[in-house]
Structures are given as C-alpha cells and as structure tokens.
Image: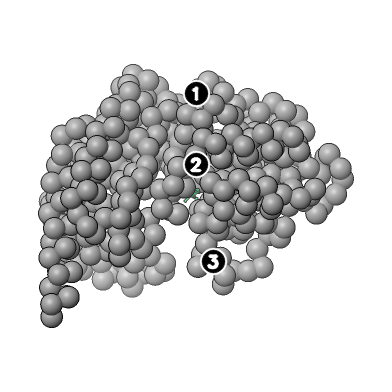
Amino acid sequence: MNMKEYINEAESVLLHTYNRYPIVWDRGDGMYLYDIEGKKYLDFVAGIAVFALGYNNQAYNDALKAQIDKVIHTSNYYYNIPAIEAAKKLKKVSGMDRVFFTNSGAEAVEGVLKAARKYAFLRDGHTDHEIVAMNHSFHGRTMGALSVTGNAQYREAFEPLIGNIRFADFNDFESVASAVTDKTCAIIFETVQGEGGIYPATKEFLQQVRTLCDKKDILLILDEIQCGMGRTGTMFAWQRYGIKPDLMASAKAIGCGVPVGAFMMTQKVANHSLTSGDHGTTYGGNPLACTAISQVIDLFEQQNILENVEKTGAYLYETLENIAAKHEYVKEHRGIGLMQGLECNGSVGEIIQRAIQKGLLLINAGPNIIRFIPPLIAGREDVDAMAKILDECLSEKQNTCFMERIE
Ligand SMILES: *Cc1c(COP(=O)(O)O)cnc(C)c1O
C-alpha cells in the first residue's frame, strides 16, 4: 500500500480526534525521521518533546531488548530492580525524596492532585479544599488533569470536572495571591508553559509563589512533563530558579519513547499524604518502562546532554532572534534551552505545512506560535539546516500575504 492508501485506512478505523499531517512514518535515526516512501525529515518536534536522545539510540535500544527477554511486567505487588534503579536515579537528579511511577503525564498530574488533597485532608479533616491553576495551562486530558487545564476549548464539553479549582494568570503574582483562600491546598503550574505558547515562569513570580506557599502551608506543584528532563539545560526547569517544589510531575522525555511518567515529592509530603491503599496502577513502574528511565538518565550523563542543550539552545536563541528581526510576520521570540517559540501575527499552519514539504518537522503551540522542541542531541548544523528552511517558508508567507493584499 502507498501512503495515501494507509492514510485512508487510518481514517476509516481510528477515532478522528487529531487532524494529522499526511505522513506515515517508517523509521527514525538521530535527528531524522523517514516516511514509508523514503523521504527524510529533520525533526524539531521529537514526538512532542519526547525523543530527547534522538531516534535509534543503540545503547537505549539494547537495554530495552535485554529487559524484554527477561520480563516486561510483574505488577506492583512485588519489587523489581529496574524500578528501584530508576527511582534512585530520579531522586538523585531531582533532589526530591519519593517517586511514584505512572504510564503517562496526565496520570502523573492525577497523582499530584490526589496527594495534595490528601495532605490537606490529613491536616484538617475537611473535604472542601481548593487548588489554584493557571489560565492557558495544559496538564493533560484525563478528567482531573483537565480540571486544572486553563483552556475552555479543551474543557467545556466535559464539565462538570473536579470542583474547587480557581484559575489565575501565569506570571502575575497578584492574580495568584488573590485566588488563594483559607481553603487552598495547592498551586499548580508548568515551569515553562508548553501548549499554552512557550512562556517561561519569571524568577520573581516563582519565588513569590514559593514564599506564599511556605507562609500558608500550600503545596507548590510544578508540571515538568514538557519542560523537564534537560529541555531547558538543567535536568528540571525549576532548578534554574533557586526554588524547589513540594510535588512535581514528569513524563515525556523521561522515557524517551516508552510510555512512562512519574510524580515525585518531598519527604514532608510523603509522610503526610498518600499511603497504602490510596493510589495504584497496574502498569506503572513496570520493568520495561523503568529500564527506559534508568537508561535515559545514564545516557544523559554519558552523552553530556545538558551541556549540549546549553550550547545548542543558545545558538538556537541567537538564530531565532535573527529570524524574528528579519521577518515582519514574526511578532515575538521566547523560550529557554531547546524549548523555544516564535509567536507570529497570524496562523502558522501554512508555514508548518510548507516546512514539512521541504523536509522539516515543526509543530505549533496554539494557532499563532511555532514551537521548537528538537531532540536534545541537536547541534549547530541542525539549527542551521532548520533555520534555512524556516527562513524560506517565512519569506514565502510574506510574499503570499503581500499578494493577498494587492489582489
Ligand atoms: C504532554 C503534557 C501533559 C500530558 O501528558 P500525557 O503523557 O499526554 O498524558 C501534561 N502536562 C504537560 C505540560 C504536557 O506537556
């Protein structure tokens, strides 16, 4: 079958919840993906900030294959060595004290919300606690995660969601402070908002929220699912800010392709929240997924991934600054490390489609923002190759805008 035939078949069997690009993938290698007709694409999407180590990393693949031949799943009623190893390594790189493994980001968010509510329940025995979340945030598609997602388009049809959530404006401390009441048990946000348009928290905002939380015994929950695992140049983005959360959610690049997530907490929260019987998962923490996490953390160190993100991230920043200055269609450039965005003066759909035709994968974050989230092994040459195509696409866009005006 050719690509068109596969796509027709997909559209007749899969539930249509995505407007997919018309590409059927065959394989990946390093920074590149290949479709089933052999066309090669430079990838600045990385499976949505997942494939940090690039495609087809041999050491990663070998570790997974070896674990498949031993055992894939045993259940959480028993212990397994990959889970112990992965938890030890996560503790070390995060500075958090306790780890719970999930299968996805949304489940990690469910876990932190339950832990925060239990913490408050143990403190005063009430069940009317509130959580403060941010406008334009994204925390996942399950009912709990959706409840703290500040985007009406994702939420509306599914209401009522879990109650007692108040929304405030990200990077606006006054707005957060005025959403806090005596019932607030937690404040949750992404350290760098991803889907909402690549907005890093300001240092001042994070520090002020941390101080407020300390003063009122409110738990600070950071969603590091997209911005964590090296993407901003530190293992977790909050490590750049001189603060520490009480709870954090991780997923995406933590497994580099194997579905896995984790939520982590300080000892203080662990001592006063979820306990035996409070939470569980059949698959979470299985030996295959934990081998992936363990291997990813080792390879980050062996391949100096953080150092590469600092270097390539700075080069990407400089490159996108130049592109932003050159093209009128670009309104603003934001981001840290290998998580950057170009906000445009209109839709970016056409630019992304042109880029794909030219063999470059980009993705949007909202209708007007192009998001740059490549594998963390990207080098200067990859940034240059990307920039050349992006520059062409933006110039073509500028020309069509002009043509639309004179027609
Ligand atoms: C992707 C994402 C999620 C949801 O993760 P899933 O694995 O898709 O459930 C939650 N929060 C943020 C910030 C994300 O980027």
Upstream in sequence: badge 3 or badge 1: 1
Residue labelled with disc 1: 93
The foreground one among 220 and 226 is 220
Residue found 19% across the figure and 54% down from its top: 327
Observer-side mark, 3 or 1, equals 3
* Colouring: one colour
Q: Amino acid at mark 2?
A: Ala
Quadrant containing the N terminus is: bottom left
Q: Quadrant of the C terminus?
A: bottom left
Left or right of 108, for residue 1: left
Q: Which tag, 2 or 3, sits closer to the chain's start?
A: 3
**Residue type of the residue flagged with mark 1:** Val
Closest to the observer, 251 or 403: 403
Q: Position of residue 171 (x, y in %)?
A: 53, 46
User: Secondary structure under badge 1?
Assistant: helix
Based on the displayed image, in which of its 4 quarters is residue 44 positioned?
top left
Spatial distance from mark 2 to mark 3, Cα to Cα?
A: 22 Å
Can the viewer see residue 263?
A: no
Instruction: For label 3, count other residues whose C-alpha is less than 10 Å away and answer few (under 14), some (14-19) or many (20+).
Output: few
Residue in the image at 72% along x and 58% along y: 164
* Residue found 37% across the figure and 37% down from its top: 336
Q: Identify whether 2 is placed above or below 341.
A: below
Task: Name the residue: 69% across, 38% down.
Answer: 212
* Residue at the spot of label 2: 201
Q: Residues within 10 Å of mark 1 (few under 14, many from 20)?
A: few
